[in-house]
Image (spheres, rainbow, N blue to C red):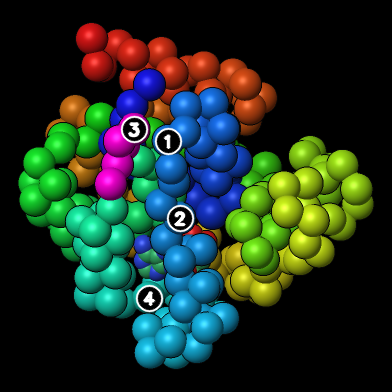
Amino acid sequence: MKMYAVFLGPPGVGKGTIAGRFKEKYDIPTIVVGDILRKHVAEQTELGLKAKQYMEAGDLVPDEIINNMVRDVILSGEWENGFILDGFPRSLPQAEALEDIMKELNKPLTGVFFFEAPEDVIIERISGRLICPKCGAVYHIKNLPPKKPGICDKCGTKLIQRPDDKPETVKRRLAVYREATAPLVDYYEKKGLLYRIDATQGIDQVVSQIESIVNSRVK
Ligand code: AMP
């Protein structure tokens, strides 16, 4: 399986978890824009120093910074099996930038998968979320616990709660999502690229729904 996909949806809806399955099953890599930013912040790069204040507040990092960063990542990579974009685009200017990037790459987007779930489900998922600060693997205290409590199954690192997963910041992130990111649903619907995914289903069901859409588009 090969795809150039966007996973769109509110924070905490499960995009990263599902993308991880496509990496395991088909070796399709995910470009996790939040992880790239968190790495810049941890390494205190120039970009990281600029991004930090926005991230801590739950706001979007300015489009220009993000667009240049994603452009560099995509155009400098080899994408034998395509890629999944998680956390980009998050605004209309970013969606337009992605169109230019895909033109330069000379590949069409396979589809934009829009993950939907009611707000109480999202809040429950975010408040129990644990991440591995080293490899980016995502767990949930109840729904997807690691084998050893508090330890990453994949690399043995101690899991943490993301500082921006605290309730005050989550509220702001959801508001930013509704304002800046939700309009992309319309944008991609008009382009005939939008596929709605019921993200309250189990992980395996979501994966197989996406598999059948990709298979039907590629044929
Ligand atoms: P995420 O891990 O996707 O929830 O992203 C964490 C934070 O990184 C967001 O709350 C934003 O501050 C920033 N961020 C991630 N992706 C983007 C993007 N496409 N545009 C602007 N800011 C972003």
Horizontal and vertical percent position of residue 125: 70, 48
Range of magenta residues: 78-82
Against 133, residue 107 (above or below) is above
Residue that carries the numbered disc 4 in the rendered image: 61
Badges 1 and 3: C-beta atoms under 8 Å apart?
yes
Q: As drawn, is 192 to the left or to the right of 211? A: left
Horizontal and vertical percent position of residue 123: 68, 52
Ligand 1 positioned in quadrant:
bottom left
Assess whether residue 203 is covered by the magenta stretch: no
Q: CA distance from mark 1 to mark 3?
A: 5 Å
Q: Residue type at mark 4?
A: Val
Q: Is mark 1 within 8 Å of ligand 1?
A: no
Q: Is mark 4 within 8 Å of ligand 1?
A: yes
Marker disc for residue 32: 2
Badges 4 and 1: C-beta atoms under 8 Å apart?
no
Marker disc for residue 90: none
Label 3 packing within 10 angstroms: few (<14), some (14-19), many (20+): some
Any part of residue 206 in sight = yes
Marker disc for residue 28: 1
Q: CA distance from mark 2 to mark 4?
A: 14 Å
Horizontal and vertical percent position of residue 217: 25, 16
Residue that carries the numbered disc 3 in the rendered image: 81
